[in-house]
Amino acid sequence: MSPAMTFRIAFKALGRNKMRTGLTMLGMIIGVAAVITLVAMGNGAQSVIEDQIKGAGTNMITVNAGNFTSGGVRLGAGASSSLTAEDADAIRTQVPGVQFVAAGAATRTQVVAGNQNWFTRVQGTDVDLPLIRAWAPQGGAFFSPQDVSSAAKVAVLGSTVTMQLFGEGADPVGQVIRIRNQPFRVVGVMTSKGQGMGEDMDDQVLVPYTTLQKKLLGMTYLQNITVSAASAGETAATADAIALLLRARHQIVPGQDDDFMIRTLEEMADIRTQAMGTMTTLLAGIAGVSLIVGGIGIMNIMLVSVTERTREIGLRMALGAKARDVLLQFLVEAVALSLIGGGIGIALGFGIAQGMERWMSWPARVPADAVGLAFGFAAAVGVFFGFYPARKAARLDPIDALRYE
């Protein structure tokens, strides 16, 4: 029998009982739709998580002042004064894979505006910090390179400081605040950032690091340098290159401890990997159960169909149909049920995903490989669960089949 005739007979048999065919496909439709929807939700959640981690700086490297030993007494982390602005410039120009660099130093002090005051962190930094932390001003602007080079008395406020000094909803841009009795002009207000790297990003005042060094603390060294690698995959290599550069610049001989500390956000990357792995396993389990249930439904209906069509099978075999023709016919019916159900399920899954994105504001992204995988798995389920009923039909004895009542 020709393949075209086999397909024609198979589809004609499925069309005899449309209700049963539709109910049989329903399990596959629900299973595939669930897979597509869950994949869309999973990818949406992953994109949200990645955006949040990116906001913290997935490729961020922090160089902190290290230990300093005086008279045999180790003063601990942060005591070294060997980290300088020249080191930051060298990292920017000499280390491959470096995208942004921000020199930094910080202190905690009282900040005054009018009759209001607030004890907060004053962070001296450079113009690259908003780019490193993906942190934009919501009002005004960040200070300029000219402000850094001239050690200008300008400040950018975190949202918590703004609320405490000027009240909720106020616009402090252009106002003057006092830090250690020195006037600073407010040039911008940062968007709310929340917790980051163990500190409240909103509860701080950002000023040029040169201003903090010269006019507030009276020092020439840095406490930290924040670096952004060009890509997350280059973070470790970039950190190693920075360590080699600083050891050479600080004339640290082999075997001698570093006078600086380098930290990356590898822990956050590990957490992301574990979370995505858990989510992938969960989605795979749910998808497998859904599609297996649909496949079992197909097998049950095909077994019923073989029983109902026993005389038909016997008649066809008596007229010259071979066992492989009968096997192929029932396999085609099972695969057709799976593929049609899978196609409808994919369309339904896309519809649900789009509905979630529109009405629930949940990002939903369905990759093309997920669609292909769902469709291919639906076909595989049809072949796997359709083979036993097809084989049973092909092995019927024509004489016994013709006698079947």
Image: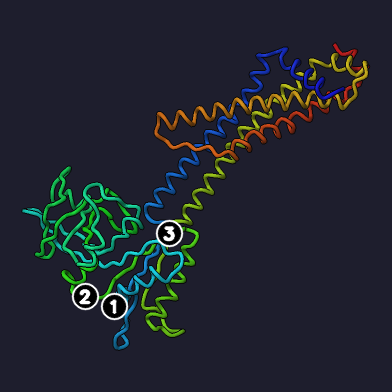
Horizontal and vertical percent for residue 189? 22, 51
Amino acid at pointer 2: Met
**Considering depth in this image, is 103 or 287 the residue closer to the camera?**
103
Q: CA distance from mark 1 to mark 3?
A: 26 Å
Q: Are marks 1 and 2 in contact (CB under 8 Å)?
A: yes
Disc 3: which residue: 59
Question: Label 1, on which residue?
Answer: 81
Q: Earlier in the sequence, mark 1 or mark 2?
A: 1
Image spot of residue 195 (x, y percent)? 31, 53
Residue 6 against residue 206 in the figure, above or below: above
Q: Is residue 310 left or right of residue 39?
A: right
Tell me whether the residue at label 1 lies in contact with that at label 3, contact meaning CB atoms closer than 8 angstroms: no
Gap between marks 2 and 3 measured at Cα: 29 Å
Up/down of 352 relative to 283, above or below: above
Name the foreground residue: 302 vs 379: 379
Q: Quadrant of residue 367?
A: top right
Q: Earlier in the sequence, mark 1 or mark 3?
A: 3
Disc 2 crowd rating (10 Å Cα; few below 14, some 14-19, many 20+) is few
Q: Is residue 192 left or right of residue 115?
A: right
Instruction: Say the numbered circle drawn on residue 219.
Output: 2
In the picture, which quadrant includes the N terminus? top right
What is the quadrant of the C terminus in the image? top right
- Circle 1 SS class: loop
Instruction: Identify the amino acid type marked 3.
Output: Asn
In this view, the residue farthest toward the left is 115
Front residue of 114 and 283: 114
Q: CA distance from mark 1 to mark 2?
A: 9 Å
Q: Amino acid at mark 1?
A: Ser
- Residue 41, position in %: x, y? 48, 37
Tell me which label, 2 or 3, sits earlier in the chain. 3
